[in-house]
C-alpha cells in the first residue's frame, strides 16, 4: 500500500510525506475548471456580480535527487473569464509557479517529511491600460515561502489497504511582487494545512481530503485570503505506472477568497 499512497498523495502541489529517492519520479499533466460567483478584482479584493470561470492547464513533478530527497515543481497556465449579463472579460497567462524540496529525515517509525516551497507568480498585478477592473486576476502577484511538516501511515482494516496523512505549515507572505506589482499592498502570514484519507478498492485508490489556509490577519485586512476546502479524489492505474486521476473540491468556508467548486482531471506517470 505504501507505493499506492505515495503515488496518490502527489495529486496537488502539497505532496504528502512519501518522499522519492534518486531514480524515482512522479509526473502529472492536468486540466481543471473552477466556478464561482465572485472573483478577485484589480484592487486585490474579492467582489461579486459576475459568473467567474478559471480554466487551468498544469504540469506537476516530483523528482528524486538523493536518498529520501526530492524536488517539487508545479507550473500552471490559467484562463480566467468573468461573465456579466451583457459582456465578458478574459485574462490568460501563467499562474502561480510553485517550486520546492522535500526531505524525509528518518527520525520516527512512521512516514514523515519536511518540505519548503516558494510561490513565484508568472504575472504582474500592476494596473494596465488594457485591463479593466472587471478582468480577473490570477492571484496576489507576490512571492510566498511556506515551510511544512508532514506525516502519514499506511495500514489496513478488514483487509482493505488504507493510508492517511496530515501536514501543516507556516506561510510567509512577502511584499516582493513580480513585475511592477502594487506599492503599499501587504499580506499577513498564514497557517496552512492538508489532510487525506484513502482506500484501495479493486485496484483504484479513493480518497477524501481537506485543505485550508487561515491568515493571522487583523479585522481590517481585506486582502489576505483564508479558506477551507473539502473534496474527494480517485487514482486509477492504467498500465505500468500510468494512471488517470480525478478530483472534485469545494470551499465550505472562505474569507477574502472566492468561494466555488473545482474539478481537475489528469494523466500521471509514476517511475
Image (tube, rainbow, N blue to C red):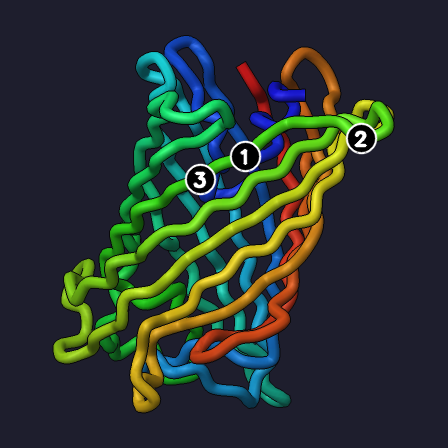
Q: Name the side, left or right, on which 58 lies relative to 178.
A: right
Residue, disc 3: 150
Crowdedness near tag 2: few (<14), some (14–19) or many (≥20) residues, C-alpha within 10 Å = few
Q: Name the side, left or right, on which 95 lies relative to 156.
A: left
Q: Quadrant of residue 211?
A: bottom right
Circles 1 and 2: CB atoms closer than 8 Å: no
Q: Answer above or below: position of 78 versus 59.
A: below
Q: Answer above or below: position of 110 versus 128.
A: above
Q: Quadrant of residue 251?
A: bottom right
Residue, disc 1: 152
Q: Earlier in the sequence, mark 3 or mark 2?
A: 3
Depth order, front residue of 108/223? 108
- SS for tag 3? strand
Q: Name the side, left or right, on which 244 lies relative to 223.
A: right
Give x and y (percent) for residue 164: 62, 38
- SS for tag 1? strand
- Disc 3 to disc 2, how far (Cα)? 23 Å
Depth order, front residue of 33/227? 227
Give x and y (percent) for residue 69: 34, 21
Q: Name the side, left or right, on which 184 lies relative to 122.
A: left
Q: How many marks?
A: 3
Asked whether residue 94 is in view, the answer is no
Q: Say which mark, if any, is on residue 61.
A: none
Q: Say which mark, if any, is on residue 157.
A: 2
Circles 3 and 1: CB atoms closer than 8 Å: yes
Residue at the spot x=44%, y=31% of the render?
112
Residue at the spot x=53%, y=70% of the render?
81
Circles 3 and 2: CB atoms closer than 8 Å: no
Give x and y (percent) for residue 119: 30, 50
Residue at the spot x=32%, y=16% of the render?
65
Q: Earlier in the sequence, mark 1 or mark 2?
A: 1
Amino acid at each position: 500500500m505504501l507505493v499506492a499512497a505515495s503515488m496518490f498523495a502527489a495529486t496537488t502541489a502539497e505532496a504528502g510525506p512519501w518522499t522519492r529517492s534518486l531514480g524515482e519520479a512522479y509526473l502529472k499533466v492536468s486540466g481543471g475548471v473552477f466556478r464561482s460567483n465572485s472573483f478577485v478584482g484589480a484592487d486585490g479584493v474579492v467582489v461579486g456580480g459576475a459568473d467567474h470561470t478559471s480554466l487551468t492547464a498544469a504540469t506537476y513533478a516530483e523528482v528524486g535527487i538523493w536518498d529520501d530527497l526530492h524536488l517539487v515543481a508545479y507550473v500552471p497556465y490559467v484562463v480566467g473569464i468573468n461573465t456579466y449579463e451583457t459582456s465578458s472579460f478574459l485574462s490568460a497567462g501563467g499562474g502561480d509557479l510553485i517550486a520546492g524540496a522535500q526531505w524525509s529525515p528518518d527520525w520516527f517509525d512512521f512516514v514523515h517529511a519536511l518540505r519548503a516551497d516558494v510561490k513565484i507568480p508568472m504575472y504582474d498585478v500592476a494596473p494596465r491600460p488594457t485591463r479593466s477592473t472587471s478582468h480577473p486576476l490570477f492571484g496576489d502577484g507576490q512571492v510566498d515561502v511556506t515551510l511544512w511538516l508532514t506525516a502519514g501511515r499506511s495500514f489496513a482494516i478488514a483487509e482493505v489497504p488504507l493510508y492517511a496523512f496530515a501536514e501543516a505549515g507556516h506561510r510567509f507572505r512577502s511584499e516582493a511582487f513580480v513585475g511592477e506589482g502594487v506599492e503599499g499592498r501587504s499580506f499577513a502570514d498564514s497557517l496552512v494545512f492538508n489532510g487525506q484519507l484513502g482506500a484501495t478498492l479493486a485496484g483504484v485508490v479513493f480518497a477524501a481530503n481537506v485543505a485550508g489556509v487561515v491568515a493571522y490577519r487583523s479585522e481590517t485586512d481585506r486582502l489576505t485570503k483564508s479558506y477551507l476546502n473539502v473534496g474527494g479524489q480517485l487514482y486509477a492505474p492504467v498500465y505500468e505506472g500510468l494512471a488517470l486521476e480525478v478530483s472534485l473540491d469545494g470551499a465550505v468556508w472562505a474569507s477574502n477568497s472566492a468561494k466555488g467548486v473545482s474539478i481537475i482531471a489528469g494523466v500521471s506517470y509514476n517511475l
